[in-house]
């Protein structure tokens, strides 16, 4: 049996790695069943669906993933997972690499690829950290998620806008951004039609 595993870290995962795209790709390559998971790949415990899947696979089965980083987030973890699968007679097929073999060359190839993937992740994290530091140094930077506004605050801002104030003036008076106010006004229109 060929079983696919697809994982994303966030709901808005970028094109090419969304759950839907991974599922379509895995099914097109012969997966009879695809296990889906959303959440960080920081540790195996954070991926309960993968843990369940690893326990269910039997000798002769094949685990298929689109990319190696969907299966493991570090060199150590990747080697641990693949060794476990190999010891249980399970084949590992990574679509952008091919079938990983339980041989000295196959294990060397796996370690090299996982090391490159981990290095790439660390570079992304470093660039993100530097980007945040640069952003924090600029005036007007606000850390974290935008403020949540009460319905009363949003209604007051909507009234100001409907009375002729510009979005810029409303934002100065209420601290409610143009986009937040536009979403609220649009939602009011939709609700009024229902």
Image (spheres, rainbow, N blue to C red):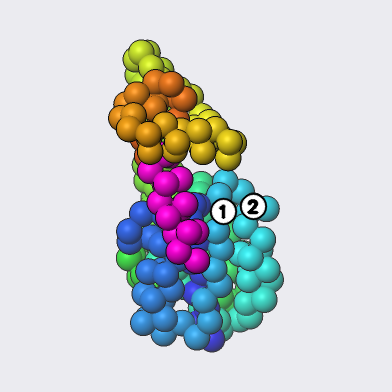
| Closest to the observer, 164 or 45 | 164
What residue sits 54% from the left and 86% below the top?
A: 1
Q: Is residue 166 above or below residue 34?
A: above
Q: Residue at x 42, y 46 (%)?
A: 185
Q: Secondary structure at mark 1?
A: loop
Q: Which residue is mark 2?
A: 46
Residue found 35% across the figure and 19% down from its top:
134
- The secondary structure that most of the magenta stretch takes on is helix
**Do we see residue 83 in this rendering?**
no
At a point 32% along the width and 65% down the height, the residue shown is: 96
- For disc 1, the marked residue is 39
Q: Is residue 178 visible?
A: yes
163, 122: nearer the viewer:
163
Label 2 vs 1, first from the N-terminus: 1
Does the segment drawn in magenta span residue 185?
yes
Q: Is residue 65 left or right of residue 61?
A: left
Query: How many neighbours does mark 1 have within 10 angstroms: few (below 14), some (14-19), or many (20 or more)?
Result: few
In the image, residue 34 above or below residue 46: below
Asked if disc 2 and disc 1 are in contact, CB closer than 8 Å, the reply is: yes
| Quarter of the figure with residue 58 | bottom right
State the separation of the CA atoms marked 2 and 1.
Answer: 7 Å
Q: Position of residue 52 (x, y in %)?
A: 68, 68
């Amino acid at each position: 049996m060929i079983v696919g595993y697809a994982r994303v870290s966030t709901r808005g995962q970028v094109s090419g790695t969304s759950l839907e795209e991974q599922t379509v790709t895995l099914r097109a390559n012969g997966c009879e069943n695809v296990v889906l998971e959303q959440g960080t790949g920081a540790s195996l415990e954070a991926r309960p669906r993968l843990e369940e899947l690893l326990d269910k696979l039997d000798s002769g089965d094949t685990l298929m993933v689109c990319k190696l980083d969907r299966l493991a987030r570090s060199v150590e973890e990747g080697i641990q997972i693949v060794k476990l699968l190999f010891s249980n007679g399970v084949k590992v097929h990574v679509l952008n690499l091919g079938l990983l073999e339980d041989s000295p060359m196959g294990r060397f190839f796996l370690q090299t690829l996982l090391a490159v993937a981990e290095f790439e992740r660390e570079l992304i994290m470093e660039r993100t950290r530097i980007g945040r530091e640069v952003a924090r140094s600029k005036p007007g930077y606000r850390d974290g998620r935008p403020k949540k506004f009460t319905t009363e605050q949003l209604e007051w801002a909507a009234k100001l806008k409907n009375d002729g104030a510009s979005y810029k003036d409303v934002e100065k008076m209420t601290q409610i951004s143009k986009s937040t106010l536009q979403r609220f006004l649009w939602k009011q229109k939709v609700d009024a039609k229902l």
